[in-house]
Image (cartoon, rainbow, N blue to C red):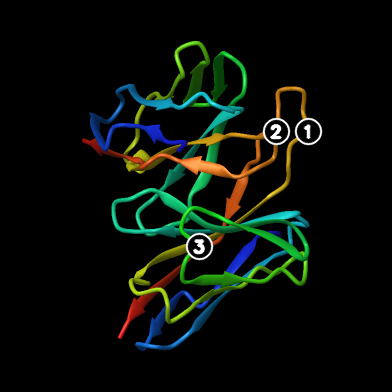
Amino acid sequence: DGGITQSPKYLFRKEGQNVTLSCEQNLNHDAMYWYRQDPGQGLRLIYYSQIVNDFQKGDIAEGYSVSREKKESFPLTVTSAQKNPTAFYLCASSLRDRSERGAKNIQYFGAGTRLSVL
Amino acid sequence: GQSLEQPSEVTAVEGAIVQINCTYQTSGFYGLSWYQQHDGGAPTFLSYNALDGLEETGRFSSFLSRSDSYGYLLLQELQMKDSASYFCASCYNQGGKLIFGQGTELSVKP
C-alpha cells in the first residue's frame, strides 16, 4: 500500500533538546511538506521541498531544520531554539497534476506526530 | 501576505445541505482546494477548482468565482460522519505550496 508514514505518533521533548520527526513516503512524489497545527487552528507551513537536495522555508521556519537527501524521506528537526514546540506536526507529499485544468497540487498527509514538552 | 477567510464553525442537521464559504487574495492565485480533517486525524483532499464553476464529487461539490475571489464547499445529504473541520487552501503558483485557511468546524446534529 502506498502512503506516508510519520513516526513517532507521540513525542516528548525536554528543555534544550533537539528532536527529529520522521516522514517517509512510497508514493514516488517529488514534493514534500511539513506543517504545524495548533488546537483549533489551520495548517502553517514550516518547510517544503520540491526536489531532492533542495528545500525552502515556509511561513514559520524559525527553530526548525530539515534535510532532503532521499526522495522518499523528509525528516524535521525541532531544535532547542523553538521555544513553543507543543503542536501537531503533519507531513505531506504531492505529485503535480499536469491536467488541462491546472496544477492541483493534491497533497497527501501522514497521520501526524504530537509533540509535547516535558 | 496571502490569506484565506472562512467561518470558524457551522452547525447543521442530518440530511440537510450546508455551504462553507472561503474568500482569498487574488495576487498570483492559481486554484482553490478543499480538505477534510476529522478530529485528531490527517487532512484528506476533497475537491479542487481552477476555473469558474461547479465541480461535483458525490455528495460534495465545490464552486469558484474568480471575479469575486470566492469559493464554497457544498455538502448535501449531511451525515453524522461529516462532522469534521474543513479547510480551503489556495495554490499561488503552479505546483507550488498551498496556503490553508483557518478551517471551519462542521457539527452535524441528529
Q: Which residue lies under the disc numbered 2?
A: A103
Rendered location of residue B90, percent (x, y): 53, 34
A31 sits left or right of A23 in the view: right
Q: Quadrant of the C terminus of chain A?
A: bottom left
Spatial separation of the CA atoms under disc 2 and disc 1: 6 Å
Amino acid type of the residue that numbered disc 2 sits on in the rendered structure = Ala
In this rendered view, identify the residue nearer to me: A76 or A64: A64
Determine the secondary structure under disc 3: loop
- Please state which amino acid type lies under the numbered disc 1: Arg
| Mark 1 nearby-residue class (10 Å; few <14, some 14–19, many ≥20) | few
Q: Residue placed at 77% from the left, 70% from the top?
A: A70
Residue A98's mark? 1
Q: Nearer the viewer, residue B66 or B109?
A: B66
- At x 30%, y 23%, the residue is B16
Residue lying at 33% horizontally and 71% vertically, measured from the top left: A84
State left or right for residue A37 relative to residue B89: left
What element does badge 2 sit on?
loop
The one nearer the camera, B26 or A74, is B26
